[in-house]
Image (cartoon, helix red, strand yellow):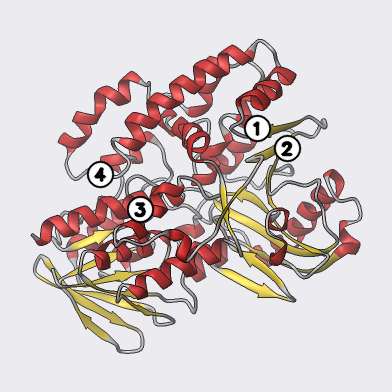
Amino acid sequence: MKKAAVIGAGFGGLALAIRLQSAGVDTTILEARDKPGGRAYFWERDGFVFDAGPTVITAPESLQELWRLSGHDISEDVNLMPVLPFYRLSWPDGTAFDYGNDDAQLGAEIARLNPDDVDGYRRFLKYSEGVYREGYLKLGHVAFLDFGSMVRAAPALMKYQAWRSVYSMVSHFVKNEKLRQALSFHTLLVGGNPTTTSAIYALIHKLERDGGVWFAEGGTNKLVAGMVRHFERLGGVMRLGDPVAGIDTLGDRATGVRTESGFELLVDAVASNADIVHSYRDLLKGSRSAQRAASKLEQKRFSPSLFLVHFGVRGTFPEIPHHSILFGPRYQGLLADIYDHGVLSEDFSLYLHHPTATDPTMAPAGHSTFYALAPVPHMGKFPADWSEIGPVLEERILAEVSRRLIPDLKDRIVTKFSYAPPDFATDLRAHLGSAFSLEPILTQSAWFRVHNRDEAISNLYFVGAGTHPGAGIPGVVGSAKATAALMLGDAR
């Protein structure tokens, strides 16, 4: 393999392209939008920098490896800054819980909620270490191309009761309801419902404890920019603002890609970091096998969407940490409304991102940058007019942040805007406006997820949230490692 095309400059596409270019494959990335990053897009407004997300950087070693492949160091292009506490969790009754990886401090926080759960937490940590070893270190960076690979993984999955949910497994170890929420909410950050997502995802706790939580100086967009700079340093080519219109095939082979501007690129292999349904349904219209695959995909369960309110304000707030989770009055009921019933509830839980807590340069001097994020049903479950609902939900979210954290928020706002499910669908071609692609339930994981190499078109590959192992920065960077191994192995 001498030439490859990667469709989409999200984290998965960038990581894959860096791996290919590092191995000597002439690689071109084709990105539809005016900036790279995919879901890690950003805006600059009135002197404020707003990251679209993701904003929680974990498993930094998976990123550092992308530079080491060619004898470089990530510090040449990106400054990763530690974030502590990892999150501050709070509930409507005023209870707060600072979550990090300092054993003594975390033990004290747990004891405040329930002294009897300190020992249960230690047992949960041991469980998390096991699923991290089996589910992430052993399986998180390898492709599942046949059912045999799933059978071989089954004993480990059974040992750690993968059929149970994260919330169920956490509840086995700890009894305090708030602590159960604190130890299970992480799956929401990769699109999973804690009450239905496989307990294997409890590995995220160990992943954070070992690797920490980080932030790229200047914003997640600076990590994207650093990856692009490194890719181009290696000789890679980035083509922006020219959406791919189609992947050309001949028999069981992909021959190249065409863009909407008329640009054509002949290559030895194609990898798509675009939305998986869009890739099969729209980019491979000439392939009957791809259309069958698209029809099957459309029947699967997709993760919810998100509603985000970005706002820049006057003043600084050292008392508000970088990452906060503002739980609402309900947990399991709210999750059922979002994932199962397709209901936009009166109550909500919020993730509040406050990057100026770590990096003041994200806002003008004496100002702060925030975004508040609420999970909402995707457009298939809740086909509403967001032009009407959005402004109402925006006001409700800002009112909640004001009530719980910044009483005079309304008077402090300098600039604000929101981002709704239709924006995910339009800007990212995300099926149903889903923010995380396929929902990470057990029957849509590993071999059951979109394979890293297509079954019918032998030199067509996939990378990103819709493939194994799933969403989140470690997930999509892991998928790039699995896909690169296939591509480079197939080329030999």
Element assignment for label 3: helix
Mark 3 vs mark 2, CA separation in Å:
39 Å
Cα–Cα gap, marks 4 and 2? 38 Å
User: Residue at (39%, 78%) from the top-left corner?
Assistant: 243
Q: Residue 278 in the image: state x and y as whole percent.
A: 36, 65
Residue type at mark 3 is: Glu
Residue 331 shows which numbered tag?
Answer: 1
In this view, the residue in front, 136 or 177, is 136
Toward the viewer: 467 or 314? 314
Evaluate whether residue 465 shows in this view. Answer: no
Against 257, residue 141 (above or below) is above
Upstream in sequence: badge 3 or badge 4:
3
Compare marks 4 and 2 and give the one earlier in the sequence.
4
- Helix or strand or loop: what does disc 4 sit on? loop
Q: Nearer the viewer, mark 4 or mark 2?
A: 4
> Is label 3 or label 2 in front?
3
> Mark 4 is on which residue type?
Val
Residue bearing the label numbered 2: 328
Residue drawn where x is 39% and y is 82% of the image: 242
The residue depicted at 29 percent of the width and 24 percent of the height is: 156
Q: What amino acid type should be assigned to the residue bearing mark 2?
A: Gly
Nearer the camera: disc 3 or disc 4: 3
Q: Which residue is mark 4?
A: 142
User: Decide: marks 3, 4 in contact (CB < 8 A)?
Assistant: no
Mark-to-mark CA distance, 3 and 1: 37 Å
